[in-house]
Image (cartoon, rainbow, N blue to C red):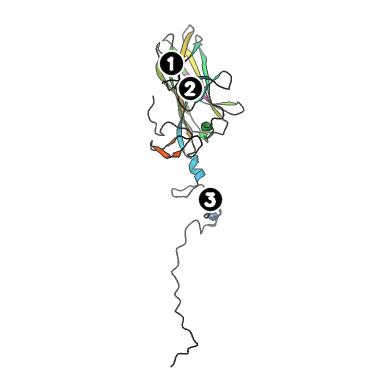
Amino acid sequence: MAKNPLIRSYPKKVNAPLQKKSAGILDDAPVRKTIATRQGTITHTPTEENDITNKKYVDSLIRGNVDLFFTNNNSDIATYKDMETEPVTAAEETITQTITANSTTLIEEFASLLDDTQIDSLTALQMGVYTSHFHALATKATGMTIYFEFYKRTAGGTETLLGTSHDSDTLGLTEAQYEVHASVLEDTVWTAGDRVVLKLYGRNTGGANKDISVLVEADTLSRVEFPAFIPPASAGGGAITNLDGGRSDETYIAVGMSPIDGGDST
């Protein structure tokens, strides 16, 4: 039978195999509402090991150790001295205080710099061990020790005690290095304008007044070191400290001179 030229022949339609739908983003309505795939915005808080997350959440988990170095420079807070994020290499300075017999006497109060970009970039102070490294000596090597209190100070001047250290070893008659530690039991929220305050005390268990001298600046590296949450792209520069203790030249943080795994202590 002759083929009718007015009737066209079409290839037989073959149904394409069903594509496996993407799990989560496309199919789960609650998840779909929290993820804008075109813009790459993710507001979901991860709970499982392979959950996707966002930059803000990751930034909040970046941790490092912050070093603040004691100086003999007057703070804008009356009677306080400055603490700076970099060592001061000027000539060594001596801070001397008479410690009353059978009592505890404040030696010095230190505060971080007002509106310091690096300190303002912190998001929280982390729970953990807070360490102060001092160079000190006493006029008599009997019953003389030092310890510190660590505070958060708000822009309005309110100071909150976060931790108190143990006493140092008994001070000697010549300059020596001492490290004392305080245990801070919970994270502390940090906002721009907050400042770190450290108060150094001398304890005298003897029956006569004695002097304690604390040395700062130059090569003493007298400082307080504490763990904090640090955004990885904060203004102020400085190489980020990686979680494995290495350094990255491509990512920047505000502060943190020591590896998260401890590093060396001078």
Q: Could you tell me the amino acid type at mark 3?
A: Thr
Marker disc for residue 111: none
Q: How crowded is mark 1: few (under 14 residues within 10 Å), some or many (20 or more)?
A: many
Q: Going 41% across and 19% down the picture, which residue do you hit?
A: 178
Q: Where does residue 219 sit, x and y in percent of width and height?
A: 41, 21
Name the side, left or right, on which 76 lies relative to 179: right
Q: Name the residue under label 2.
A: 70
Query: Identity of the amino acid at label 2?
Result: Phe
Q: How far across and how far down the image is residue 191, in percent?
A: 56, 34
- Identify the residue at the far front of this view: 90
Dot 2 falls on a residue whose secondary structure is strand
Q: What quarter of the picture does the N terminus occupy?
A: bottom left
Between residue 46 and residue 35, name the one nearer to us: 35
Considering the image in quadrants, where does the C terminus appear? top left
Badge 1 amino acid: Ala
194 in magenta: no
Residue, disc 1:
136
Given residues 170 and 177, the one toward you in this image is: 177
Q: Nearer the viewer, residue 147 or 8?
A: 8
Q: Give the range drawn in magenta.
A: 147-151
Query: What is the distance, in whole Å, between disc 2 and disc 3 at their CAs?
Result: 43 Å
Quick check: marks 2 and 1 in contact, CB under 8 Å?
A: no
182 in relation to 4, above or below: above
- Main SS category, magenta section: strand
- Which is in the foreground here, disc 2 or disc 1? 2
Circle 3 sits on which residue? 41
The picture places residue 56, in percent across and down from the top left corner, at: 51, 43
Q: How far apart are marks 2 and 1 (CA)?
A: 13 Å
Residue for point 53% across, 50% down: 41
